């Protein structure tokens, strides 16, 4: 039965994904019936608990009344759900896996939904060892769009089941796709460069255009090196490297026809992408700022572009984000396409740190089957056609930026980096940094790390397959 169910689900996903690929501007999910059941089930005061990790000091699932329109709508949805099904919704700011396991051992429920990072759940082998329930075992339609795009749901796929969902129509919390790119219009204008959005519309937003900007936005006239202006800057994590890789069709990990994960970075496309970044560094066209302090030069008009995780540009995702620090407009743009980019392949991913909802083993799957189809619908006063309108007005400085954001979000793919375990942070990340900074050979390094990373993929994924 599981085989038939999974096959049907995958067919539904392919249909939804094919429709999306035809026109990136179209809604990525089908409409659904908003009408309620003739008689709503009475859950007899069941306490439905959402446990979430904080991010950037803010907790978007537990908003304070009156602080934002979105937060008030989310609180209204909780109240609607409580009244409709006779439940009590409890919100916890933390998502404490240690406490969950302690209570689980005592047969005490900790939470019904836990909002956690994919690397924490899979890297800690909580999913592999059976401590969470797959949503595909619940009576919910994972292809409806309520629970995310096909690729976001693929990020929770393991051994025939789907373990993670995201509240797609809530807009937040973000699942943290990576990498995102922003540009500073003031710097672009100061150095008389073409607007990246216009280049994108013309089909000219590619590596050549970016390289040209790097050459022209390289101002070392100030005697203080700290005040020099660059188009691009390194950070302490290889966001720039991943952006180049994904923009050229390269993937660190791919899934074979047999369902197994394989290290796949030792390819021409990957080498070409890393050599592109390295060539800019060799000509001193990338500032090596070392860490996230590069955000300060960006907002002070000494950087044209900034590359990071998506949540950095969203106001609801942290008090230190661009939305709170920029005094002027900043724009979203996709990283320019490489020479071997495949149209529709996606330039951003549901990655190692991406966050999703998971259902602990000792929750009640029947309660989920009743509540989730109602809770995860567009928030009160919104529909599948209008749910993004207010989000666009309150968060983005232009429609072009919003279109870039939607493309990042809706075309993001699953990169399976969580299944590298600590091989991601201890092996892949530092070696990507070494290769583009000229301290390691690109071709030799990509080959030398293959065995270790493949061993990790086997240990965290392949060896658990039936």
Image: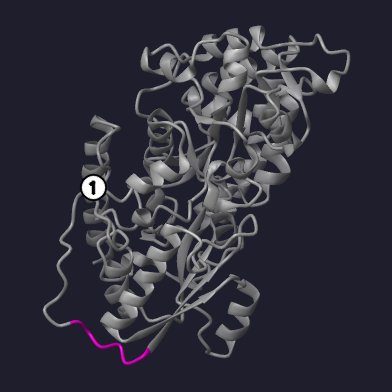
Q: Please rate how many residues cluster around mark 1, counting C-alpha atoms within 10 Å: few if below 14, some from 14 to 19, many from 20.
A: few
Q: Where does the image place residue 137, in percent across and percent down from the top left?
A: 32, 69
**In the figure, residue 454 lies in which quadrant?**
top right
Q: Position of residue 61 (x, y in %)?
A: 49, 65
Q: Residue at x 37, y 41 (%)?
A: 410
In this view of the protein, can residue 10 be seen by the observer? yes
Magenta span of residues: 40-45
Where is residue 462? Give x, y as percent.
50, 52
State how many labels appear: 1
Nearest the viewer among 177 and 379 is 379
Residue sitting nearer the eye, 4 or 328: 328
- Left or right: 333, with 352 as reference point: left
Picture residue at 37% right of the left edge, 17% below the top: 201
Which residue is disc 1 drawn over? 385
Q: Farthest left residue? A: 38
Compared with residue 264, is residue 438 higher up or lower down, i.e. above or below? above
Colour scheme of the picture:
one colour
User: Could you tell me which secondary element the residue under label 1 belongs to?
Assistant: loop
Question: Is residue 158 visible from the viewing direction of this image?
Answer: no
Relative to the observer, which residue lies in front, 148 or 202? 202
Q: Residue 216: where, in percent of width, then height?
A: 65, 7
Check the image and report above or below for 245 versus 383.
above
Q: Is residue 82 left or right of residue 443?
A: left
């Amino acid at each position: 039965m599981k085989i038939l169910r999974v096959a049907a689900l995958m067919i539904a996903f392919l249909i939804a994904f094919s429709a999306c690929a035809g026109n990136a501007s179209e809604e990525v999910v089908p409409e659904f019936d908003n009408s309620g059941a003739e008689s709503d089930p009475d859950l007899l005061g069941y306490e439905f608990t959402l446990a979430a990790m904080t991010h950037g000091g803010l907790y978007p699932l537990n908003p304070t009344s009156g602080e934002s329109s979105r937060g008030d709508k989310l609180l209204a949805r909780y109240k609607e759900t409580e009244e409709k099904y006779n439940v009590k919704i409890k919100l916890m700011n933390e998502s404490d896996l240690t406490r969950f396991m302690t209570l689980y051992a005592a047969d005490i429920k900790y939470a019904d939904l836990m909002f956690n990072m994919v690397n924490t759940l899979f890297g800690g082998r909580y999913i592999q060892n059976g401590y969470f329930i797959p949503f595909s075992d619940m009576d919910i339609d994972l292809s409806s769009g309520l629970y995310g795009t096909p690729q976001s749901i693929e990020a929770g796929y393991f051994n025939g089941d789907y373990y993670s969902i995201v509240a797609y129509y809530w807009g937040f919390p973000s699942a943290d796709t990576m990498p995102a790119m922003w540009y500073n219009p003031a710097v672009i204008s100061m150095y008389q460069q073409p607007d990246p959005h216009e280049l994108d519309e013309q089909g000219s937003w590619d590596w050549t255009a970016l390289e040209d900007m790097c050459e022209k936005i390289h101002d070392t006239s100030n005697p203080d090196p700290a005040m020099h202006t660059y188009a691009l800057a390194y950070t302490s994590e290889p966001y720039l490297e991943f952006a180049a890789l994904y923009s050229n069709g390269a993937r660190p990990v791919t899934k074979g026809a047999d369902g197994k994960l394989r290290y796949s970075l030792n390819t021409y496309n990957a080498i070409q992408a890393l050599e592109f970044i390295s060539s800019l560094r060799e000509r001193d066209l990338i500032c090596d700022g070392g860490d996230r302090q590069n955000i300060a030069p960006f907002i002070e008009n000494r950087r044209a572009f900034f590359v990071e995780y998506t949540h950095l540009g969203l106001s609801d995702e942290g008090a230190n984000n661009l939305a709170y620090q920029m005094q002027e407009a900043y724009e979203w743009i996709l990283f320019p396409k490489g020479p071997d980019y495949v149209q529709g392949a996606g330039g951003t991913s549901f990655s190692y740190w991406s966050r999703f909802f998971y259902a602990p083993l000792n929750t009640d799957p029947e309660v989920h089957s009743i509540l989730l189809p109602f809770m995860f619908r567009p928030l009160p006063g919104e529909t599948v056609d209008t749910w993004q309108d207010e989000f666009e007005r309150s968060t983005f400085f232009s429609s072009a930026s919003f279109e870039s954001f939607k493309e990042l979000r809706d075309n993001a793919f699953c990169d399976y980096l969580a299944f590298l375990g600590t091989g991601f942070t201890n092996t892949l990340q530092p070696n990507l940094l070494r290769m583009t900074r000229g301290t390691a050979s690109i071709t030799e390094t990509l080959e030398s790390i293959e065995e270790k990373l493949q061993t990790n993929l086997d240990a965290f994924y392949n060896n658990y397959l039936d």
